[in-house]
Amino acid sequence: MGLIVQKYGGSSVGTTERIKSVSKRICRTVAAGHQVVVVVSAMGRTTDSLVQLAREVSSNPSKREMDMLLSTGEQISIALVSMALQELGQPAISLTGAQVGIITEAQYGKARILEIKTERIRRHLEEGKVVVVAGFQGVMRGDDLEITTLGRGGSDTSAVAIAVALEADYCEIYTDVPGILTTDPRIVPSARLMEEITADEMLELASLGAKVLHPRAVEIARNFGMPLVVKSSWTDDPGTKVISPPPTDRCVVGLEITRAVDAVQLDNNQAKIALLRVPDRPGIAARLFGEIARHNIDVDLIIQSIHEGNTNDIAFSVAREVSGKAEAVARAIAPSLGSTDADTDIIVDKKIAKIAIVGAGMIGRPGIAAKMFQALADAGVNIQMISTSEVKVSCIVAEEDCERAIAAVCSAFEIDSSHLTQAPQHKGVPVRAVALDQNQAQLAILLVPDVPGMAAAIFGSLAEANISVDMIIQSQRCRILEGVPRRDIAFTVAANEAQEAQRVLSQLQPKLDFKGIVLNPSIAKVSIVGAGMIGTPGVAAKFFQALAAENINISMITTSEIKISCVVDASHGIPALKAVHSAFGLGGDTLLQVPSRE
Ligand code: ASP
Ligand code: MG
């Protein structure tokens, strides 16, 4: 006999008919001999309607009353599910977050879970009942029982946290899609259901997967090794398994990471190779990395900054022992890449280290990258390269600065520096999924003086203005102007925040003395994700070749170990997604039926 936590999303309990059908499914699980805890969302769009009601009454409702209001949605659905179960002859009891003892931070609107009491749930399970718990809500510590909510989409987080606290065998997330797909099926109809995906991959896919599974839930599952499966409420298909590393002995008190950064990673066995002034046209990255792959060299970070004039800089890192070989390949191919003006310069630096911060908590939380840059600046460490992904910020620094840099970053994020982790080393398929983000704009700040503290000042100001930054790149090319070495810094933000970002930056101009801001509002970001790309040469090359074959120009490249993202022109977003999905053989023959979402 096992203990299973099942979570049903808003659409799965959207009508009383659906509640009845879901209840039958719950009974089947009980009949198979399991104890079941059910976690439910509010019915359908209830939470949206409640938000709307609040707006009609107040332009700026108090956060406390907002949580009081929003938490009622789940209270309706737990009672109805419980009644439907009882109607089927299955003993059941519904419990609110406060009744269970789901203890959260003292913060309304987006509280994180600190602890879940298990006594009451266990008692009812022992009585043979199904326990139906309200998702998305908790209470603060203390006698006042102040109700909190976890942030929109938070009932996934409730479910996984409850599963961890109860040491359940696994947690099932029931939804209205068959599982997690290789890409967005509305754009690529041949999108296929994945049988499995690792939690780390899922986190990097936040922009694609967040509608199906909340990143905070994935992070908890990963940290505690809780098996998760995402499947349809309407079929018996197996869905998608989210695989986590084996459970650790993490303490379940302080269950959710309340910090944005979960770990600091160090790799000091890297070398950097940069090609300056390569021509800006389709196919260049494809040829360069095609050649590198042909020599079986595995690349780690790749960045390509926005172009100045009609040339680009491309920099990448490789393991130090193969850097000689990589340099030779780069030197051999450079002349044939077709530079017209000054020859392509090649810079090789073997004395570098890569320091990265990782954590799902940084999604949607401005200021995390800025804090890292500030910590490095305060320690007098200059940043040579920056590359970011959804859940990671990587900086290349000089090897001699490495210890100071690690100490500074660990102390800024309160990470014990004896707990440095290595980047993930999973085996798996090189590319699991492909994502497209069409809601971003690109900003470039030109000729920023290359002294410690610049990135910190720029991203600190954006964070103060509450603007979340996505991809960040600091260019390789260093130009001397007015006696000062300078670099470009480029990044992407949500399209609707681009104007504001530009305004904030222009105010910084007199202080920072950079030479211009360029805004490109019409871009698209295409990303590939797969843990198996670590140690597999040729993945980047294949990605870039797929774009080149469609004559699509790449204006920015950033990477993490398990993700590569390219910025392309907005009009190329969809063709790029289709080409890349098919280049990696991700398409299937069977068309999946997926309900349309807004
Ligand atoms: N009902 C909440 C929301 O709509 C929580 C959830 O559905 O996960 O955001
Ligand atoms: Mg949801």
Image (cartoon, rainbow, N blue to C red):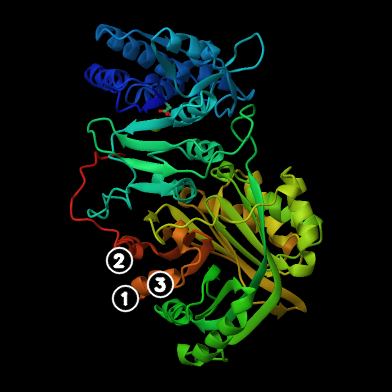
Alpha carbon separation for disc pair 3 and 2:
10 Å
Task: Give the crowd class for mark 2: few <14, some 14-19, many >=20 residues within 10 Å.
Answer: some
Give the residue type that dot 3 points to. Answer: Phe
Q: Are marks 3 and 1 in contact (CB under 8 Å)?
A: no
Q: Quadrant of residue 141?
A: top right
In the rendered structure, which amino acid carries the disc numbered 1?
Ala
Please provide percent x and percent y for residue 142.
Answer: 67, 12
Q: Which mark is residue 362?
A: none
Instruction: Tell me residue 102's x, y (percent).
Output: 55, 19
The residue at the point 45 percent across, 82 percent down is 291
- Is residue 165 toward the left or the right of residue 25 in the image? right
Mark 2 or mark 1, earlier in chain: 1
Dot 1 surroundings within 10 Å: few (below 14), some, or many (20 or more)? few
Residue indicated by mark 1? 549
Other residues around mark 3 within 10 Å, as few (<14) / some (14–19) / many (≥20)? many
Residue with the mark numbered 3 = 544
Quarter of image, ligand 1: top left
State the SS at label 1. Answer: helix
Q: 268 or 356: nearer the eye?
A: 268
Q: Are marks 2 and 1 in contact (CB under 8 Å)?
A: yes
Mark 2: amino acid: Ala
Q: Earlier in the sequence, mark 3 or mark 2?
A: 3
Alpha carbon of mark 2 to alpha carbon of mark 1: how far?
A: 9 Å
The C terminus sits in image quarter: top left
Q: CA distance from mark 3 to mark 1?
A: 9 Å
Classify mark 1 as within 8 Å of ligand 2 or not, answering yes or no: no
The answer to whether residue 305 is visible is no
N-term-proximal mark, 3 vs 1: 3
Badge 2 element: helix
The percent position of residue 387, horizontal first and vertical second, equals 58, 62
Question: Does the Cβ of the disc 2 residue fall within 8 Å of ligand 2?
Answer: no
